[in-house]
Image (tube, helix red, strand yellow):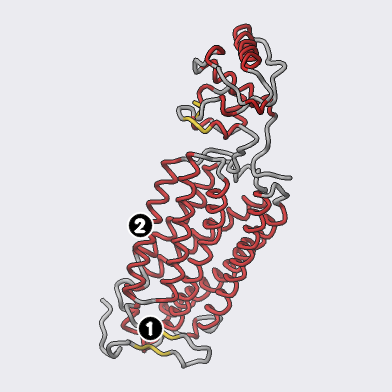
Amino acid sequence: MILPFGLCKRGALLSSLALLLLVAGVRPETVTAVPTTTGISPAEVTAWLTSVVAAVETGAKFDGIPTDIPLSMLPSRIPVNALPSSIIEQFNLESFQNQTIPTRYLSEEGQNPYGYVPNFGLNLAALICFAIIWLIQTALGAWYQQWWFGISWFIGCGLETGGYISRVVSHDDVTAINPFLVQIICLTLGPAFMMGGVYYIFGKLVIIWGEQYSKLKPMWYSILFIICDVISIVLQAIGGGMAAVAVQNRKDTKPGTHIMVGGLAFQVASMCVFIFLISDTLWKVYRAKKQNPDKENIFNPQYANIRQSKFFKPLIIAIICSIIAVFTRCVYRVVELAEGWSGYLISHEGYFLVLDALMMIIGGGFLSVIHPGYVLKRYKIRIRNRKNEEEFEDKNQNFEGASFN
């Protein structure tokens, strides 16, 4: 089986724990009881710890270490400073010298699937940021009633928030498998839902400018790329579920991991096509403005008020920045998972915090500060497949004469 974190030899681990007892001041004579199921008497444990003390004092190597010393005899949490440098390096604990970790973290019974201890402060900061973004998107989505975008971002930001809750919980017990699996699944699926909302909004922007500036009909931005998003979500969910079951049943995680990577790669590929199409549209719009002195007559006259909104240009910039941030994150996740669960990127949290957490906070932040509702209000641009079937309607009042400033 290939676990997310490699197993260590029992002898080496127990050696480090014994050294901890010495450094922490736990002397052999303090050991008074051993569970009878181990078959080791208190006298034998005392003799073993005495030999460890002697070995430390003389600089000798540890020899003849019993393999069934129970974890219940050891402190519940271990000061990282008390561990040998070899163990600190092996478990990637260099950044946690002044902290303590659960004893079970250094045992076969409780493996650490992260390969590191999640940083409490930085993950808590990411949690707070996404909780704020989630609340903003929920409130503005309900107020402006841009349902496709609002629901997509409600789900996506909710998944991101849930993922960082799990990472914060994992800080106190890295051996708990459920928080690890929850954060993997949530943080993998969240961006796909968020991009689904962006695809739909851009289809509306094409209508606002005019279909002649786009290679695709507005409806196809929703149909094509949301279908791609659904396929990506399904593949990632199936792969994540298979990997989760494999971890819990101590089986090979490679099949599930490969499916997850395939889903992420498919998402990156579809985003590349979308970025090409949106770049082509923006270039045509820009060129049309430069070549025509009467700029408004070259665009769809029905939506002139929307284009004159003071938030229209900032919204376009926010969408571009959000796409770039999410795309950067998706490329990183493909490379990360392609290396496997014990790869370099996935076992070093700094890369994750910058290329995943920070990128998604930037992407979510831009479209929360400049929400599409600021431009579209409660007006509904209904996207149709045939030309000139777009309908722009207000549920409560006529569009004519409405102000967007």
Left or right for 128, reference 5: left
Look at the numbered disc 1 and give the secondary structure of its residue: strand
- Residue bearing the label numbered 1: 380
Instruction: Residue at the far front: name it.
Output: 36
Residue 205 quadrant: bottom left
Q: Is residue 227 left or right of residue 40?
A: left
Is residue 344 placed above or below 87 in the rendered structure?
below
The residue sitting at 38% across, 59% down in the picture is 133
Residue in view at x 27 percent, y 89 percent: 397
Q: Position of residue 165 (x, y in %)?
A: 45, 50
Callout in the foreground (2, 1): 2
**Residue 358 image point, x, y percent:** 46, 51
Up-down relation of residue 131 to residue 47 (above or below): below
* Front residue (pair 376, 125): 125
The residue at 52%/56% (across/down) is 187
Residue at the top extreme of this rendering: 58
**Could you tell me how far apart the alpha carbons at marks 2 and 1 are, in whole angstroms?**
26 Å
Specify the amino acid type for callout 2. Ile
Q: Give the camera-side residue of 184 and 14.
A: 14
In depth, the one of 317 and 158 nearer the eye is 158
Split into 4 quadrants, where in the image is the N terminus?
top right
Residue 145 percent across, percent down from the top left: 36, 77
Q: Tell me the residue at 58%/71% (across/down).
A: 230
Which callout, 2 or 1, points at the residue further toward the start of the chain?
2
Crowding at mark 1 (Cα within 10 Å: few <14, some 14-19, many 20+)? some
Residue that label 2 marks: 132
Amino acid, disc 1: Lys
